[in-house]
Amino acid sequence: MGARKHNRAEAIKEAKKTKYSAALRNCPTSPRKMRLVADLVRGVGVKRALDLLKFSPKEASRKLEKLLLSAISNWQIKNEGVRMEDANLFVKEVFVDSGRMLKRLRPAPQGRAHRIRKRSNHVTIILESKQISE
């Protein structure tokens, strides 16, 4: 591997040490409904995001709350001995991509059929800690 490539790989590795993520695959909710909930927590502190998700009436918020707890757990594994309150964690990125689509047919009048698309999605949460400048 060349020196430039090696330096770039090291820089990427260092950047990943401050990012903590979790992913949810094939969640049986439409991406449009999940994006409504994801927009609530993007750029918000972790404690506030958990509160928003806990008291949101939407079904997708339950799944996103579990995913956020998983990302927090991933942070705790990488940072043993550090308190979560001191780290100032916030939700840096949340993105929702469409997953696989189950295609079904529903009978319609006069021998026709309407297509039903049962959508699913993939959600990824990335947390980052704010560095407090002193």
Image (cartoon, rainbow, N blue to C red):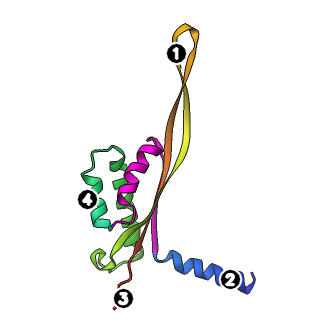
Between discs 3 and 4, the one toward the N terminus: 4
Task: Give residue 51's position: percent from left, percent from top.
Answer: 25, 59
Between discs 4 and 1, the one toward the N terminus: 4
> Which amino acid, mark 4?
Asp
Between discs 3 and 1, the one toward the N terminus: 1
Residue 51's tag is 4
Q: Which residues are magenta?
A: 19-44
What residue appears at the point 36 percent right and 69 percent down from the top-left corner?
90
Q: CA distance from mark 2 to mark 3?
A: 30 Å
Q: Nearer the viewer, mark 3 or mark 4?
A: 3
> Which amino acid, mark 3?
Ser
Other-residue count near label 3 (Cα within 10 Å), few / some / many at <14 / 14–19 / ≥20: few
Between discs 2 and 1, the one toward the N terminus: 2
What residue appears at the point 52 percent right and 78 percent down from the top-left corner?
15
With 36 as the anchor, is 99 left or right in this view? right
Q: CA distance from mark 4 to mark 1?
A: 43 Å
Q: CA distance from mark 2 to mark 1?
A: 59 Å
> Which amino acid, mark 1?
Pro
Question: Which residue is labeled 2 in the image?
Answer: 6
Secondary-structure class at tag 4: helix
Q: CA distance from mark 3 to mark 1?
A: 63 Å
Task: Give residue 31's position: percent from left, percent from top.
Answer: 47, 45
Question: Which residue is labeled 1 in the image?
Answer: 107
Question: Which residue is labeled 3 in the image?
Answer: 133
> Which amino acid, mark 2?
His
Task: Give residue 115's position: percent from left, percent from top.
Answer: 55, 25
Callout 2 touching callout 1 (CB < 8 Å): no
Secondary-structure class at tag 1: strand
What residue appears at the point 29 percent right and 80 percent down from the top-left corner?
86
Other-residue count near label 1 (Cα within 10 Å), few / some / many at <14 / 14–19 / ≥20: few
With 132 as the anchor, is 122 left or right in this view? right
